[in-house]
Amino acid sequence: MASMLEFRTPGFNPYAVKYSPYYDSRLAVAASANYGIVGNGRLFVLGLGPAGIQPEKTFDTNDALYDLAWSEINENQLVVACGDGSLKLFDLAAGDFPVMNFAEHKREAFSVCWNPIAKDSFISSSWDGTIKIWSPSRPTSLKTLPVGNCTYSACFSPTNPAIISCVSSDSHIRLFDLRTPVSAKYHLTTVIPAHAPPALPLLSTGQAFPAAAAAPAEILTHDWNKYRDTVLATGGVDRVVRTFDVRNPAGGPTGLLLGHEYAVRRLAWSPHASDVLASASYDMTVRVWSDGSAVSPPHQHQQPPLPPQAQAQGGSTVVPVGTQLGVMNRHSEFATGVDWCLFGTGGWLASAGWDQRVLVWDAHSLLRG
C-alpha cells in the first residue's frame, strides 16, 4: 500500500476514530490507558498536513474513552463516551476541560451518535441496557429508551431524525420511532433477530447458509447505508458482517460478508458509494467490501450457477455473498476503529487499533474492478 500516514498514541489504546464532518484535514481519536480496563482516557484531535499527522489538541479524562462523535452544529465541539458512564462535551476553543458533563448512565457508556438531520441532539448507549437522548445545552437527558441488554451501538437514521437503531448483546437489532406514542413500547417499533437464517438458506456461492451464522452472538457494531435508507449492516462476535433491509424484519439477512477471523468491532458504510463498506476487526485487519448490490458487480461472470432450489424460485431467496475488495493488515493489535473521509475522491480511510496507532490511508490501492 503506497499511501499511508501514521500517528502514535503512546500509553493509550484507541477505541474509535472519526473524521470531522467540516474538514478533510481533521480527525479525532478516543483512547484509553491499559486497553480500557482501568485508568484514564485521552481524546486526540489531529490535523493532517504536509508534515503528516500532527496533534492539534488533547483532552484528558478520569476514565476510559470508548467512542466519540463530532457535533453537527459546532465545528469545534465533540462528545465522548466514558467508562464511568458519563458523556463529556469538549470545545477546541474553550480550554482543557469539558464544557458540559452528562452523567446518567449506570454503567459504561459505549457509543455516541449525533443526529445528522435535526443536528440539535445526540444519543448514547450503555452497558446498562439503555439509550439516552440528549441536548448539548441540557445536563439532563431528554428521553430514555430501554433496551434491556448490554447495548454496544446506537445510531440515528441518516435520513430520518426520528428513527434510532441499536444493537446489543442479545443478537437483536431494535428500531425506535420517536413519532410513535411513548406508551407504545417506549417508541420501539421493530425487533430484528440478526442471527435468524433467511427463508431459503442458500448463498449466491451455491453453498448452504452456514449453521454457525444462525447461532445467537453479541452484535458489537452497526451502521446505516448512506444511499439506501432502509439498509443497515451489523457485525459482532461471530465474525460475519450481515446486511438487512428493515422493511422486512422477518426476512433474515439480505447479504453476508465472510472473511474476518475474529470478532468485527466497527463498521462504516462509504459516503461515496452505495455498495461499499469498511470493517475493523479483532483479527487486526481492516477490510473493504462490496455488498454485491451494485447494478453490475465486479466479477459477476465468475459467480457459480445458482442451486436448483434457487433457480426454481427465480433466485429471489438466495442470499448474496459480498466481495472482499481488499485487506489492510498494518495494525499489530485489535483494529477497533475505522471511518471514511467525507471529502475528496472517496477513498481515504482512518483506522485505529490497540497497537497505539492511527493510520490514514488511501483505499483506492485496495479496490479492484
Image (cartoon, helix red, strand yellow):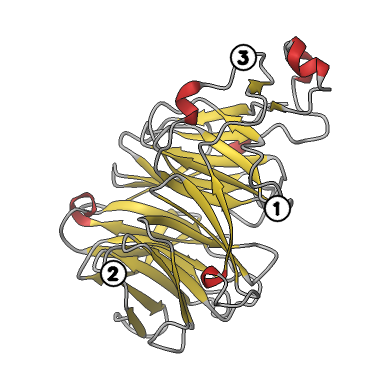
Judge from the rendering whether residue 352 lies leftward or rightward of residue 251; answer left or right. Answer: left
Q: Residue most toward the bottom?
A: 138
Q: CA distance from mark 2 to mark 3?
A: 44 Å
N-term mark: 2 or 1? 2
For the residue pair 353 and 200, the one nearer the viewer reads as 200
For the residue pair 219 and 216, the one nearer the viewer reads as 216
Give how far across and how far down residue 256 sits, in percent.
59, 31
Give residue 273's quadrant in the image.
top right
N-term mark: 3 or 1? 3
Give how far across and how far down residue 357 sits, in percent.
34, 46
Give residue 140's quadrant in the image.
bottom left
N-term mark: 2 or 3? 2
- The image quadrant where one finds the C terminus is top right
**SS at badge 1:** loop
Give how far across and how far down residue 88 sits, in percent.
35, 76
Residue beneath label 3, please?
207
Q: Amino acid at mark 1?
A: Thr
Residue beneath label 2, please?
85
Give residue 212's quadrant in the image.
top left
Judge from the rendering whether residue 13 lies leftward or rightward of residue 3; answer left or right. Answer: left
In the image, what residue occupies the spot 53% across and 26% down? 258
Task: Please rate how many residues cluster around mark 2, counting C-alpha atoms within 10 Å: few if below 14, some from 14 to 19, many from 20.
Answer: many
Task: Please rate how many residues cluster around mark 3, counting C-alpha atoms within 10 Å: few if below 14, some from 14 to 19, many from 20.
Answer: few
CB contact under 8 Å: marks 2 and 1: no
**SS at badge 3:** loop
Seen in the picture, residue 223 relative to 311 is either above or below; the reply is: below
CB contact under 8 Å: marks 3 and 1: no
Give how far across and how far down residue 363 sits, in percent.
58, 38
Residue beneath label 1, please?
230
